[in-house]
Image (spheres, rainbow, N blue to C red):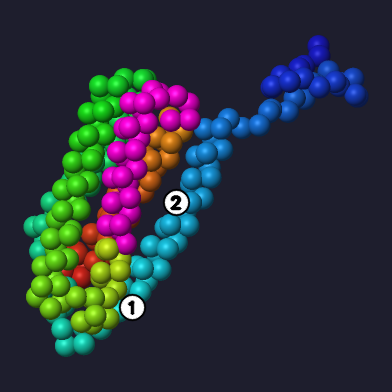
Amino acid sequence: MAMTATVGHAHADPHHIGLVIEHPGPAPKRIVTAYGFWVFLLSDIVMFSCFFAAYAVLSGQTAGGPKGSEIFEQRNVAIETVCLLLSSFTCGMASIAADVHNRFWFYLGMAVTCVLGLIFLAIEFNEFADLIARGYGPSRSAFLSSFFSLVGCHGLHVSAGVLWLLTMMAQVFAKGFRADVLRRMMCFALFWHALDIIWVGVFSVVYLLGGSV
Protein backbone atom coordinates (compact mmCIF):
# COMPACT_ATOMS: atom_id res chain seq x y z
CA MET A 1 0.00 0.00 0.00
CA ALA A 2 1.40 3.35 -0.94
CA MET A 3 2.33 5.67 1.93
CA THR A 4 1.93 9.43 1.63
CA ALA A 5 3.19 12.29 3.80
CA THR A 6 1.49 15.63 3.39
CA VAL A 7 2.77 18.91 4.81
CA GLY A 8 1.93 22.22 3.12
CA HIS A 9 1.69 22.14 -0.69
CA ALA A 10 2.26 18.82 -2.44
CA HIS A 11 4.85 18.26 -5.14
CA ALA A 12 4.94 15.57 -7.80
CA ASP A 13 6.57 12.25 -7.00
CA PRO A 14 9.16 11.86 -9.81
CA HIS A 15 10.29 8.37 -8.69
CA HIS A 16 6.76 6.98 -8.31
CA ILE A 17 7.50 5.45 -4.93
CA GLY A 18 4.28 6.64 -3.36
CA LEU A 19 5.91 9.14 -0.97
CA VAL A 20 4.81 12.71 -1.58
CA ILE A 21 7.20 15.23 -0.01
CA GLU A 22 5.93 18.71 0.61
CA HIS A 23 7.84 21.84 1.58
CA PRO A 24 6.29 24.18 4.12
CA GLY A 25 5.92 27.81 3.20
CA PRO A 26 7.71 30.71 4.91
CA ALA A 27 7.48 30.89 8.70
CA PRO A 28 4.68 33.05 10.16
CA LYS A 29 5.58 36.67 10.88
CA ARG A 30 5.16 36.04 14.60
CA ILE A 31 7.89 33.39 14.52
CA VAL A 32 10.22 35.50 12.39
CA THR A 33 9.69 38.54 14.64
CA ALA A 34 10.33 36.53 17.81
CA TYR A 35 13.50 35.01 16.34
CA GLY A 36 14.85 38.42 15.34
CA PHE A 37 14.07 39.88 18.72
CA TRP A 38 15.80 36.99 20.49
CA VAL A 39 18.92 37.87 18.50
CA PHE A 40 18.65 41.44 19.80
CA LEU A 41 18.18 40.20 23.38
CA LEU A 42 21.23 37.96 23.11
CA SER A 43 23.33 40.91 21.94
CA ASP A 44 22.01 42.89 24.90
CA ILE A 45 22.95 40.07 27.26
CA VAL A 46 26.47 40.04 25.80
CA MET A 47 26.72 43.76 26.61
CA PHE A 48 25.58 43.16 30.18
CA SER A 49 28.08 40.31 30.46
CA CYS A 50 30.83 42.84 29.78
CA PHE A 51 29.51 45.09 32.54
CA PHE A 52 29.36 42.12 34.93
CA ALA A 53 32.93 41.17 34.03
CA ALA A 54 34.14 44.74 34.60
CA TYR A 55 32.39 44.86 37.97
CA ALA A 56 33.90 41.53 39.01
CA VAL A 57 37.39 42.80 38.19
CA LEU A 58 36.98 46.27 39.73
CA SER A 59 34.80 45.48 42.76
CA GLY A 60 37.81 45.50 45.06
CA GLN A 61 39.33 48.70 43.67
CA THR A 62 37.86 51.15 46.18
CA ALA A 63 40.80 53.61 46.22
CA GLY A 64 40.30 54.11 49.93
CA GLY A 65 36.61 54.74 49.45
CA PRO A 66 33.62 52.76 50.71
CA LYS A 67 32.98 49.11 49.99
CA GLY A 68 29.65 47.74 48.92
CA SER A 69 28.75 46.57 52.42
CA GLU A 70 29.14 50.16 53.64
CA ILE A 71 26.80 51.83 51.16
CA PHE A 72 24.17 49.28 50.06
CA GLU A 73 20.74 49.46 51.67
CA GLN A 74 19.63 45.84 51.53
CA ARG A 75 16.05 46.68 52.55
CA ASN A 76 15.58 49.00 49.58
CA VAL A 77 17.20 46.50 47.25
CA ALA A 78 14.83 43.80 48.49
CA ILE A 79 11.85 46.06 47.73
CA GLU A 80 13.24 46.74 44.25
CA THR A 81 13.62 43.02 43.62
CA VAL A 82 10.10 42.19 44.78
CA CYS A 83 8.65 44.95 42.60
CA LEU A 84 10.48 43.81 39.50
CA LEU A 85 9.69 40.12 39.98
CA LEU A 86 6.01 40.91 40.58
CA SER A 87 6.01 43.06 37.46
CA SER A 88 7.15 40.04 35.48
CA PHE A 89 4.04 38.17 36.65
CA THR A 90 1.68 41.04 35.81
CA CYS A 91 3.36 41.47 32.43
CA GLY A 92 2.72 37.79 31.74
CA MET A 93 -0.92 38.24 32.71
CA ALA A 94 -1.19 41.19 30.33
CA SER A 95 0.33 39.07 27.54
CA ILE A 96 -2.23 36.32 28.11
CA ALA A 97 -5.04 38.90 28.14
CA ALA A 98 -3.77 40.31 24.84
CA ASP A 99 -3.77 36.86 23.26
CA VAL A 100 -7.42 36.36 24.20
CA HIS A 101 -8.30 39.99 23.31
CA ASN A 102 -9.43 40.91 26.82
CA ARG A 103 -9.00 44.67 27.14
CA PHE A 104 -9.81 44.95 30.85
CA TRP A 105 -7.19 42.46 32.07
CA PHE A 106 -4.70 43.72 29.50
CA TYR A 107 -4.92 47.30 30.74
CA LEU A 108 -4.96 46.19 34.37
CA GLY A 109 -1.87 43.99 33.95
CA MET A 110 0.01 46.67 32.03
CA ALA A 111 -0.95 49.40 34.51
CA VAL A 112 0.26 47.35 37.50
CA THR A 113 3.46 46.49 35.61
CA CYS A 114 4.02 50.18 34.93
CA VAL A 115 3.48 51.16 38.58
CA LEU A 116 5.86 48.46 39.81
CA GLY A 117 8.47 49.53 37.24
CA LEU A 118 8.17 53.16 38.33
CA ILE A 119 8.56 52.19 42.00
CA PHE A 120 11.70 50.28 41.06
CA LEU A 121 13.08 53.28 39.19
CA ALA A 122 12.22 55.69 42.00
CA ILE A 123 14.09 53.59 44.57
CA GLU A 124 17.09 53.23 42.27
CA PHE A 125 17.17 56.96 41.48
CA ASN A 126 17.00 57.74 45.20
CA GLU A 127 19.88 55.34 45.84
CA PHE A 128 22.05 56.98 43.19
CA ALA A 129 21.18 60.50 44.36
CA ASP A 130 21.99 59.60 47.96
CA LEU A 131 25.36 58.08 47.04
CA ILE A 132 26.34 61.10 44.95
CA ALA A 133 25.25 63.49 47.72
CA ARG A 134 27.54 61.63 50.14
CA GLY A 135 30.48 61.99 47.77
CA TYR A 136 30.31 58.43 46.47
CA GLY A 137 29.74 59.18 42.81
CA PRO A 138 31.09 57.13 39.89
CA SER A 139 34.34 59.14 39.82
CA ARG A 140 35.19 58.25 43.45
CA SER A 141 36.69 54.84 42.65
CA ALA A 142 36.84 52.15 40.01
CA PHE A 143 34.44 50.08 42.11
CA LEU A 144 31.82 52.82 42.10
CA SER A 145 32.36 53.45 38.38
CA SER A 146 31.61 49.81 37.58
CA PHE A 147 28.68 49.81 40.02
CA PHE A 148 27.02 52.88 38.50
CA SER A 149 27.67 51.58 34.97
CA LEU A 150 26.13 48.15 35.56
CA VAL A 151 23.16 49.13 37.71
CA GLY A 152 22.58 52.36 35.79
CA CYS A 153 22.54 50.57 32.45
CA HIS A 154 19.89 48.20 33.76
CA GLY A 155 17.91 51.16 35.06
CA LEU A 156 18.02 52.80 31.64
CA HIS A 157 16.65 49.61 30.12
CA VAL A 158 13.81 49.57 32.64
CA SER A 159 13.07 53.21 31.81
CA ALA A 160 12.92 52.35 28.12
CA GLY A 161 10.69 49.40 29.00
CA VAL A 162 8.22 51.64 30.84
CA LEU A 163 8.02 53.98 27.83
CA TRP A 164 7.51 50.99 25.55
CA LEU A 165 4.78 49.71 27.89
CA LEU A 166 2.89 53.00 27.67
CA THR A 167 3.26 52.93 23.90
CA MET A 168 1.75 49.43 23.77
CA MET A 169 -1.22 50.53 25.87
CA ALA A 170 -1.78 53.46 23.50
CA GLN A 171 -1.52 51.21 20.43
CA VAL A 172 -4.09 48.74 21.78
CA PHE A 173 -6.40 51.65 22.62
CA ALA A 174 -6.06 53.10 19.12
CA LYS A 175 -5.76 49.97 16.96
CA GLY A 176 -7.08 47.10 19.05
CA PHE A 177 -5.51 43.64 19.14
CA ARG A 178 -4.29 43.58 15.55
CA ALA A 179 -1.72 41.00 14.51
CA ASP A 180 1.09 43.56 14.27
CA VAL A 181 0.23 44.97 17.71
CA LEU A 182 0.27 41.48 19.23
CA ARG A 183 3.72 40.87 17.72
CA ARG A 184 5.01 44.06 19.33
CA MET A 185 3.43 43.04 22.62
CA MET A 186 5.23 39.70 22.40
CA CYS A 187 8.55 41.50 21.89
CA PHE A 188 7.85 43.82 24.81
CA ALA A 189 7.08 40.87 27.10
CA LEU A 190 10.33 39.15 26.08
CA PHE A 191 12.24 42.37 26.77
CA TRP A 192 10.66 42.87 30.19
CA HIS A 193 11.24 39.28 31.30
CA ALA A 194 14.86 39.53 30.14
CA LEU A 195 15.32 42.60 32.35
CA ASP A 196 14.02 40.61 35.31
CA ILE A 197 16.51 37.84 34.64
CA ILE A 198 19.37 40.34 34.38
CA TRP A 199 18.28 41.98 37.63
CA VAL A 200 18.47 38.62 39.41
CA GLY A 201 22.12 38.55 38.35
CA VAL A 202 22.67 42.15 39.50
CA PHE A 203 20.97 41.46 42.82
CA SER A 204 23.04 38.32 43.41
CA VAL A 205 26.45 39.53 42.24
CA VAL A 206 26.35 43.20 43.24
CA TYR A 207 24.15 43.41 46.31
CA LEU A 208 24.27 39.95 47.92
CA LEU A 209 27.92 39.08 47.28
CA GLY A 210 29.20 42.66 47.23
CA GLY A 211 27.17 43.67 50.27
CA SER A 212 28.64 40.90 52.38
CA VAL A 213 32.28 41.74 51.72
Q: CA distance from mark 1 to mark 2?
A: 24 Å
Which residues, given as a range, are shown in magenta?
Answer: 153-181
Q: Residue furthest front?
A: 174
Q: Nearer the viewer, residue 199 or 141?
A: 141
User: Residue 90 bears which disc, if any?
Assistant: none
Task: Please state which amino acid type lies under the numbered disc 2.
Answer: Leu
Q: Where is 3 relative to 158, above or below?
A: above
Disc 1 is placed on an element classified as helix
Q: Nearer the viewer, residue 200 or 133?
A: 133
Q: Residue furthest top?
A: 1
Q: Where is 187 relative to 123, above or below?
A: above
User: Residue 57 bears which disc, if any?
Assistant: 1
In this orientation, does residue 71 appear?
no
Specify the principal SS of the magenta part. helix
- Answer left or right for 75 relative to 113: left
Q: Where is 67 relative to 87, above or below?
A: below
Which residue is drawn at the image coordinates 86% and 21% (left, top)?
13
Q: Where is 180 relative to 125, above or below?
A: above
Please provide percent x and percent y for residue 26: 66, 31
| Residue 167 on the magenta segment | yes
In this orientation, does residue 28 appear?
yes
Which residue is drawn at the image coordinates 24% and 31% (left, top)?
109
Please provide percent x and percent y for residue 141: 23, 82
Disc 2 is placed on an element classified as helix
Q: Residue furthest bottom?
A: 64
Which residue is drawn at the image coordinates 54% and 35% (left, top)?
31
- Answer left or right for 154 relative to 128: right
Answer with mark 1 or mark 2, whichever residue precedes in sequence.
2
Task: Please state which amino acid type lies under the numbered disc 1.
Answer: Val
